[in-house]
């Protein structure tokens, strides 16, 4: 029997464009939704822009437009980006909507009646010039612990201390620079701890993945705290009923936006919303990133329970995207907007690449540009498109575009392909997309081997009917592989459907064979990626974004690497070195060639520090030298060892040095 399923992705914030990090989630969700639709299930995919809060208000002010205008523009951009990546929502709405206002007030009043809301005085930082209370991230100042200047109001990026904004030394408003005042105000709090028992039951009942449950357990142990759900005006959001100048905190009404999007959808097509959202016919799944687990695994289900709404069947949590093993970075050109990507590359390349990496876990996935190019060219071009282009044109040109019948060997190949059906379907269902891709790719190898063995390009000269039989098997293989790939590659599948002259392919079509059938003219499916396209995309990402400050960013605290022994450390030979000479490198604007005195023969080392240091700044500097690193032959010469530095690259590079008194060649212990 067909299942009825509702699926949501986290709502993107209407303060900036969609980038390739966001796309991990929307592509993962879209693939899952398309898979269910292809199984014959009714699957509805709801999402919306998350439009409220101080950052939106401030961005709109800075742009000289109203917040309403700003979120309207951003909505258009987001929709266009999602469309371009073939992400197909059943409804893409906004949290700034009458439905969301109604539902937020409803849920709030029900929580209030249930005794889950209390009022309490809080002391908050307020800017007299901006005439607004300042969220933690909008106050900056000197860290009370390590005295680093220009730190956020809630944590220090230098020493990782966490504190209250009022503990900062010399605090100032991040927007206008004025020292803020302290003001007492009454806020509304949601008593999360009242729901601890029910939440624990929900989580142990398999509400989310094991690794997520473990993290939640830490939070339970630390104790659930009351949650401040109100903000003082001016604020862009929904006013709290009965209040003059207090608003719901954006995080209260954002997830309610899922329900509001569903309600808007139901009203548009006259469906019974109560039945759809709160009835038992529909299963409900939320897809989110691991950065918002606290909100979605604790606050959100507690709010729903308290207000008499049902909770999701499951919360699917995924990891972050890294590019070439590191956090996305504007200076490296790896912070790539959806729009920039689209100027250079086919969206289905990214859909396929992410699918080939995604599992049901919460580990980060890495986009290695090298691997991305190789995999696209090897799999999409070399395996899937190749199979079609080796059979389609020949059939059309030499054999009146007509398929014959499968012989025994052909039938064997096709049976091998369909035998993996359940395996592939299970992998899709359980979000093991990488597993599905691996299997499909191995089956394509099988089909390509069949072509090699039967050599249609040779037999076509002597035996047309034998060739027709061979190509009939190949075309059937193309059809089956396309069904398997269709959730990931919808556009590719559309082209294949046209060329095979068949209707929309679904999983139930796997058992059917295409025989004595006329196909259409072949159209090209994929073009190879050239490295220069990727380079150009990254170069453009640097240009468009390097100057923009990022007002709201999570503090970077990278986890430590696994433990190692002092013996492990002993393998690394670190020495004091003195820079004798530093030179620019012709043709490589990021590199400097350093000549180093390390106590013995001079060493030459190529370092990617030219954007942060001029050659003059480096001459005579003392540096730390990694002496026994295997020398590397680069395009610009041999690089021996390396010097130690901190930073994310580009201008953000800081060389490590030593206190006076050290001599070149001395060992670092
Ligand atoms: Zn500090
Ligand atoms: Zn201010």
Image (tube, rainbow, N blue to C red):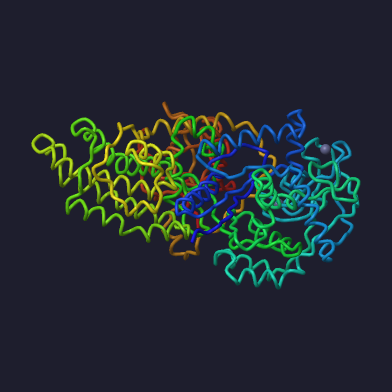
Towards the viewer: 546 or 196:
196
What percent of the width, then of the height, locates residue 534?
Answer: 43, 34
Describe residue 174's horizontal placement relative to residue 546 as left or right.
right
Which residue appears at 29% of the width and 36% of the height? 519
Residue 391 image-quadrant placement? top left
Towards the viewer: 615 or 30:
30
Which residue appears at 77% of the width and 39% of the height? 174
What percent of the width, then of the height, locates residue 296?
Answer: 66, 58
What percent of the width, then of the height, locates residue 329?
Answer: 55, 41
Which residue appears at 57% of the width and 29% of the height? 544
Q: How many marks?
A: 0
Residue 517 image-quadrant placement? top left
Residue placed farthest to the top in the image? Answer: 586
Residue placed farthest to the left in the image? Answer: 462
Towards the viewer: 325 or 201:
201
Towards the viewer: 137 or 374:
374
Considering only vertical position in the picture, is 197 above or below 98? below
Q: Tell me if I can see residue 289 in this picture.
A: no
Describe residue 205's horizontal placement relative to residue 492 as left or right.
right
Considering only vertical position in the picture, is 324 above or below 60? below
Q: Tell me if I can see residue 426 in this picture.
A: yes
Describe residue 170's horizontal placement relative to residue 83 as left or right.
right
Considering only vertical position in the picture, is 164 above or below 48? below
What percent of the width, then of the height, locates residue 114?
Answer: 82, 66
């Amino acid at each position: 029997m067909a299942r009825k399923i509702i699926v949501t992705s986290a709502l993107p914030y209407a303060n900036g464009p969609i980038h390739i990090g966001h796309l991990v989630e929307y592509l993962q969700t879209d693939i899952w939704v398309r898979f269910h639709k292809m199984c014959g299930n009714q699957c509805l995919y709801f999402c919306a822009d998350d439009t409220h809060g101080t950052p939106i208000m401030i961005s709109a002010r800075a742009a000289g437009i109203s917040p309403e205008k700003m979120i309207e523009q951003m909505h258009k951009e987001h929709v266009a980006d999602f469309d371009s990546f073939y992400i197909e929502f059943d409804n893409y709405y906004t949290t700034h909507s009458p439905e969301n206002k109604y539902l937020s007030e409803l849920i709030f009043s029900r929580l209030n009646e249930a005794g889950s809301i209390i009022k309490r005085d809080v002391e908050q930082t307020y800017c007299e010039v901006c005439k607004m209370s300042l969220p933690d991230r909008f106050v900056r100042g000197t860290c009370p612990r390590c005295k680093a200047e220009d730190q956020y109001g809630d944590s220090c990026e230098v020493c990782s201390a966490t504190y209250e904004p009022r503990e900062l030394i010399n605090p100032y408003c991040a927007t206008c620079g004025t020292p803020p005042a302290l003001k007492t105000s009454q806020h509304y709090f949601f008593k999360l701890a009242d729901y601890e028992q029910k939440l624990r039951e929900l989580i142990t009942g398999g509400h989310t993945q094991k690794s997520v449950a473990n993290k939640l357990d830490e939070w339970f142990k630390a104790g659930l705290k009351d949650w401040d759900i109100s903000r003082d005006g001016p604020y862009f959001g929904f006013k709290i009923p009965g209040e003059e100048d207090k608003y719901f905190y954006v995080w209260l009404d954002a997830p309610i936006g899922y329900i509001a999007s569903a309600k808007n959808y139901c009203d548009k097509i006259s469906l019974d919303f109560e039945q759809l959202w709160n009835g038992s016919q529909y299963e409900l799944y939320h897809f989110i990133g691991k950065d918002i687990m606290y909100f979605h695994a604790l606050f959100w289900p507690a709010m729903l329970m308290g207000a008499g709404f049902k909770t999701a069947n499951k919360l699917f949590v995924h990891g972050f995207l890294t590019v070439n093993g590191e956090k996305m970075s504007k200076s490296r050109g790896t912070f790539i907007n959806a729009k920039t990507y689209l100027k250079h590359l086919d969206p289905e390349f990214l859909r396929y690449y992410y699918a080939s990496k995604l599992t049901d876990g919460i580990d980060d996935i890495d986009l290695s540009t090298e691997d991305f190019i190789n995999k696209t060219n090897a799999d999409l071009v070399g395996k899937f498109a190749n199979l079609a282009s080796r059979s389609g044109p020949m059939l059309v040109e030499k054999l009146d575009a007509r398929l014959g019948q499968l012989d025994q060997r052909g039938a064997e190949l096709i049976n091998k392909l369909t035998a993996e059906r359940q395996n592939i379907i299970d992998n899709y269902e359980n979000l093991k997309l990488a597993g599905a891709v691996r299997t499909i790719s191995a089956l394509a190898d099988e089909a390509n081997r069949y072509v090699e063995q039967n050599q249609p390009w040779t037999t076509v000269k002597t035996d047309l009917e034998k060739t027709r039989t061979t190509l009939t098997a190949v075309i059937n293989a193309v059809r089956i592989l396309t069904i398997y790939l269709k959730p990931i590659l919808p556009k590719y599948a559309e082209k294949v459907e046209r060329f095979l002259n068949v209707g929309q392919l679904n999983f139930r079509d796997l058992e059917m064979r295409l025989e004595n059938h006329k196909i259409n003219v072949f159209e090209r499916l994929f073009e190879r990626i050239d490295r220069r396209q990727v380079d150009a995309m990254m170069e453009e990402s640097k240009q468009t974004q390097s100057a923009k400050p990022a007002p709201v960013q999570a503090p970077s605290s990278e986890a430590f690497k696994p433990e190692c022994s002092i013996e492990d450390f002993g393998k690394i030979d670190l020495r004091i070195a003195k820079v004798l000479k530093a030179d620019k490198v012709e043709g490589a604007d990021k590199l400097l060639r350093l000549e180093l005195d390390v106590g013995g023969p001079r060493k030459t080392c190529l370092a990617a520090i030219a954007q942060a240091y001029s050659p003059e700044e480096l001459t005579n500097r003392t540096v730390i030298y990694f002496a026994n690193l295997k020398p590397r032959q680069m395009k610009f010469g041999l690089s021996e060892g390396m010097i130690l530095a901190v930073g994310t690259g580009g201008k953000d590079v800081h060389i490590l040095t030593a206190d006076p008194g050290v001599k070149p060649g001395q060992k670092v212990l």
